Amino acid sequence: MIITKTPYRISFFGGGSDYPSWYKKNGGAVLSSTIDKHVYISCRFSPKYFKQKYRIVWRKIENVQRINEINHKAVRELLKYLKIKPGLEIHYYGDLPARSGMGSSSSFTVGLMQALYRIKKNKLTKANLAKKSIHFEQKIMREVVGSQDQTSASFGGFNKIVFNKNNSISVKKISSKKNLKKLNENLILIYTGINRTAHKIANQYVNKLTTAKKEHINRILSYVKEGEYILKQGNIDDFGHLLHDAWMEKKELSSLITNSKINEIYEEALRYGALGGKLLGAGGGGFLLMYMKKNERKNFFKKNKKLINIPFKFTTVGSEIIFDQLTGETR
């Protein structure tokens, strides 16, 4: 049996510039961090006397004889892509809901890729894990997704991730621990309860780039450098204001990015002292990130009791194998 643990991520600035259709022409970058919420995946070959050839446990339980009968698209296509022999059992557990803007789909892909390579007695570097996961989602699955989620999940940590025109990706660690701690203390994660499919929203602005939308993405991209500078200088409240500016820009990319419920929560948070925030992921629902100090958030949640606050901490570790029956190693 192999068990992997793969983090979710929060993306602060630069989202949209991580799509190949953009960065292969213009270059791109994001500022993001993994957090202490994870996807767990276990894989093992079942005993030969089990009737089913494949058993997949997620929100459904699938017991099937042929690979094409598997309903979970990512599992089915990755098993075919890696030519995994029959008899496999896969279990999936997640700390956060799917389709919530936290990079859950890519974290699942990265974690499963890591597990399946290991069950074939192979290991991947962080860079290769990211590269293969990006290729699988974009070229094999043909999903309209960017390249930041797979990279963040593979490497872990608070990073500036740069997407170059030659299709290479570089990862720069942000190492200001004191300022990152201050930032973390002033951020809250609010679950809106709205699920959405990211690629449907992203397709609205990534593959239909007007001149105006290009200008918005260029401004969103400029916030990456500003955010990095703020974290070096230490005036962390400026980060909150910058989140607000970036959110105002992002909303201009598509009418699907926000809605009346999300706008209402956002404006209410501002009234209670939040300096800024953003909806995570492509938009449309999921988690709302707000910059709000502790003394202000208490009154906010007292008034808005139906909203769910998800405590979190930044982490430094990417996808890892936490149990390896092949070697007997446990982490």
Image (tube, rainbow, N blue to C red):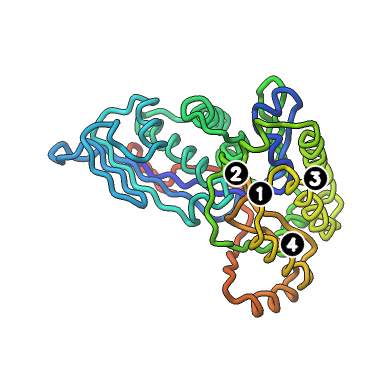
- Residue occupied by mark 3: 228
How far apart are the two marked residues, 4 and 3, measured between alpha carbons?
Answer: 16 Å
> Which label was assigned to residue 291?
4
Q: Disc 2 or disc 1, which is closer to the eye?
A: 1
> Image quadrant of residue 222?
top right
> Which label was assigned to residue 249?
none
Q: Which of the two residues, 75 or 259, is positioned nearer the viewer here?
A: 259
- Mark 3 is surrounded, within 10 Å at the Cα level, by few (under 14), some (14 to 19) or many (20 or more) other residues, namely some
- Residue occupied by mark 1: 257
Percent across and percent down for residue 307 are 59, 70
Of callouts 2 and 4, the N-terminal one: 2
> Image quadrant of residue 267?
bottom right
Of callouts 2 and 1, the N-terminal one: 2
Of callouts 1 and 3, the N-terminal one: 3
- Residue occupied by mark 2: 156
Q: Disc 2 or disc 4, which is closer to the eye?
A: 4
Cβ–Cβ under 8 Å for marks 2 and 3: no
Of callouts 2 and 3, the N-terminal one: 2
Percent across and percent down for residue 77 are 39, 30
How far apart are the two marked residues, 2 and 4, measured between alpha carbons?
Answer: 22 Å
Q: Residue at x 33, y 43 (%)?
A: 90
User: Amino acid under label 3?
Assistant: Glu
